[in-house]
Amino acid sequence: MEPQLQEISQALVQAVMAACRQAKAQKQDPGLLAQLLQSGTGLGAWVCQALYAPNGQQAAEALSQALETCRESRRLLEELQAAGGLADPAPLSLCGELERLLEAARESQGNL
């Protein structure tokens, strides 16, 4: 599960950055884009912290934060999509996939 988490989180961060660049060119709400960019990049950081945590407790805390941040990213992506600023559904798809992986990893922390 570890390689999948890392791979999907990296792909999501890249997709969020691309979506933000595209939405900026479309003159979408800069506040929303700043929140989305912060959430998307923070998500990658939380996943790395979970994967390389020195103990199970820190891994569990990082997984919980990653899951919360993933849900926030999804909400922001949906808001951007509703405003017509998200042409490619890939970031939402990746977000859903990562959310499922994070939930599974949190339930069975022995896999990290």
Image (spheres, rainbow, N blue to C red):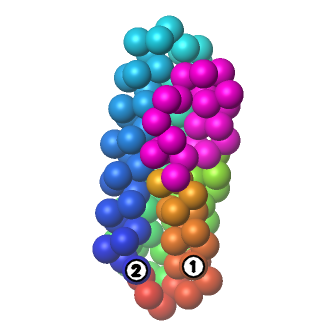
| CB under 8 Å between discs 2 and 1 | yes
Quarter of the image with the C terminus in it: bottom left
59 with respect to 96 (left or right) = left
9 with respect to 86 (left or right) = left
Kindly state the secondary structure of the residue where label 1 is placed.
helix
Asked if the magenta segment contains residue 86, the reply would be yes
**Is the residue marked by circle 2 packed among few (<14), some (14-19), or many (20+) residues within 10 Å?**
few
Q: Give the range drawn in magenta.
A: 73-93
| Nearer the observer, 97 or 107 | 97
Residue drawn where x is 49% and y is 29% of the image = 87
The residue indicated by pointer 2 is: 1
Q: Indicate the amino acid at tag 2.
A: Met
**Position of 84 relative to 99 (above/below):** above
Asked if the magenta segment contains residue 81, the reply would be yes
User: x, y percentage for residue 107?
Assistant: 61, 83
- Considering every residue shown, the one lying at the far bottom of the view is 110
Residue drawn where x is 52% and y is 71% of the image = 101
Quarter where residue 79 is shown: top right
User: x, y percentage for residue 37?
Assistant: 46, 33
User: x, y percentage for residue 55?
Assistant: 44, 82
**Is the residue marked by circle 1 packed among few (<14), some (14-19), or many (20+) residues within 10 Å?**
few
Q: Indicate the amino acid at tag 1.
A: Ala
Kindly state the secondary structure of the residue where label 2 is placed.
loop
Quarter of the image with the N terminus in it: bottom left
| Nearer the observer, 52 or 2 | 2
Residue 104 numbered mark, or none: 1
Quarter where residue 67 is shown: bottom right
User: x, y percentage for residue 93?
Assistant: 52, 52
**Position of 85 relative to 75 (above/below):** above
31 with respect to 98 (left or right) = right
Q: Is the magenta stretch mostly helix, strand or loop?
A: helix
